[in-house]
């Protein structure tokens, strides 16, 4: 099922190829959290930031399959269709903080 | 190398985009009916849109050597008003025999409501009655997982063979279930809200290259009509062979789309 090339990038090559772009993404995330700290308003995180912080914890828990696990964290885990929809769009994280 | 962008909304794109896509190797596109960014208020508004998809847009694409095909439906974002959705659906058969129509799409769910499910089921009934291919939109962000599961159950209930249904906008948490249940899967390459080219190639490496394609879903929002060639570059960056690049971005779309007698490529 897997489709890796026979001469797939090795560990060092993956680091060489992708480190800088992900270093930049790490700094972007840090800058976003700093910006939140500086912003006036509620001291409490809204549900999106609560989920973001939980996702960050998953990044460093030492287990694999991080992307899929973060996707599940950010998903509505209920199973029944809704009667009505309060909005047409999506938030990016389930409004229920415990979801 | 030739490629197909099997999901892009060219009514929202400029002629320059057609030119750049053709220069990058695009030889065919398929354009599902979608939400215009606002709710249309009349059946005639949809009639005009379907004329655009079946008549105007193919001519515009042909100027750049691109074969244009489309899918027809009322999209799930406008399906909450069941009565209105049914009125719109009543005119779809007027257009299904146009030469570039491949089937019903992009149907599916948006916020996973009961009304959306009702209209999804009626679209599936129409597809089954006419033996049409189906292109499915899955919900955005936090609603995707639940919606994808509800949609797959609805297709199973309809009796349509999953091999004639492509479920689009899959990501890491949905692609496995979609492929395991026998559907085709589409990965949409978006800057923020779906797959990046890097993650799409990760998915190929983990879940394989059978029954899967990539598309830009370029539209009026943040999107990139050259996303497919950029993903091809990402595959080459990781030393995937040209045969695999071609399979995912050219051969696989042909295999699925050719099940419609209306799909064609110029020699």
Image: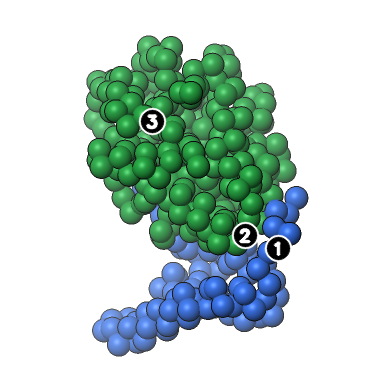
Chain colours: A blue, B green
Category of crowding for the residue at label 3, using alpha-carbon neighbours closer than 10 angstroms: few (below 14), some (14–19), many (at least 20): many
- B109 vs B61, left or right, is right
Both on one chain, marks 1 and 3? no
Q: Real-space Cα distance between discs 3 and 2?
A: 29 Å
Image point 36% across, 51% down: which residue?
B223
- Residue B239's label in the rendered image is 2
Residue B190 percent location from the top left of the image = 43, 54
- Report the residue marked by disc 1: A7
Image point 41% across, 60% down: which residue?
B192
Judge whether residue B110 can be spotted in this image. no
Residue B147 percent location from the top left of the image = 54, 45
Above/below status of B109 relative to B234: above
Q: Are marks 3 and 2 in contact (CB under 8 Å)?
A: no
Judge whether residue A90 can be spotted in this image. yes
Q: Are marks 2 and 1 in contact (CB under 8 Å)?
A: yes
Q: Are marks 1 and 3 in contact (CB under 8 Å)?
A: no
Residue B264 percent location from the top left of the image = 49, 22
Along the line of sight, the residue nearer the viewer: B94 or A77? B94
Q: Quadrant of residue B82?
A: top left
Image point 43% across, 12% down: which residue?
B97
Both on one chain, marks 3 and 2? yes
Secondary structure of residue under mark 2: loop
Q: Real-space Cα distance between discs 1 and 3?
A: 35 Å
- Residue B66's label in the rendered image is 3
């Amino acid at each position: 099922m897997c489709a890796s090339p026979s001469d797939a990038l090795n560990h060092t090559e993956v680091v060489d190829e992708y480190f800088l772009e992900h270093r930049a993404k790490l700094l972007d995330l840090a800058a976003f959290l700093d910006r939140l700290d500086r912003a006036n308003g509620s001291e409490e995180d809204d549900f999106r930031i609560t989920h973001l912080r939980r996702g960050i914890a998953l990044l460093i828990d030492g287990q694999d399959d991080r992307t899929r696990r973060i996707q599940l964290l950010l998903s509505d885990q209920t199973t029944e269709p809704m009667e009505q929809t309060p909005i047409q769009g999506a938030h990016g994280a389930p409004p229920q903080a415990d979801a | 190398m030739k490629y197909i962008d099997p999901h892009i909304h060219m009514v929202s794109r400029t002629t320059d985009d057609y030119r750049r896509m053709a220069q990058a190797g695009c030889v065919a596109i398929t354009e599902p009916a979608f939400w215009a960014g606002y709710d249309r208020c009349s059946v005639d508004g949809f009639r005009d849109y379907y004329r655009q998809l079946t008549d105007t847009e193919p001519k515009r694409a042909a100027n750049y050597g691109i074969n244009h095909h489309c899918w027809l439906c009322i999209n799930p974002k406008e399906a909450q008003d069941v009565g209105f959705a049914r009125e719109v659906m009543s005119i779809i058969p007027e257009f299904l025999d146009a030469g570039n129509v491949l089937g019903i799409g992009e149907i599916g769910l948006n916020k996973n409501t009961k009304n959306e499910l009702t209209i999804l089921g009626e679209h599936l009934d129409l597809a089954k009655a006419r033996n049409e291919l189906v292109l499915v939109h899955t919900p955005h962000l936090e609603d995707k997982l639940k919606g994808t599961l509800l949609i797959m159950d609805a297709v199973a209930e309809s009796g349509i063979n999953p091999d004639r249904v492509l479920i689009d906008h899959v990501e890491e948490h949905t692609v496995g279930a979609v492929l395991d249940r026998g559907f085709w899967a589409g990965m949409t390459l978006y800057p923020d809200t779906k797959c990046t080219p890097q993650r799409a190639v990760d998915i190929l490496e983990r879940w394989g290259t059978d029954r899967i394609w990539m598309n830009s879903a370029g539209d009026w929002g943040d999107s990139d009509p050259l996303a497919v060639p950029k993903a091809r570059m990402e595959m080459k960056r990781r030393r995937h062979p040209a045969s695999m690049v071609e399979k995912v971005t050219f051969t696989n779309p042909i295999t699925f789309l050719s099940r419609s007698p209306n799909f064609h490529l110029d020699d």
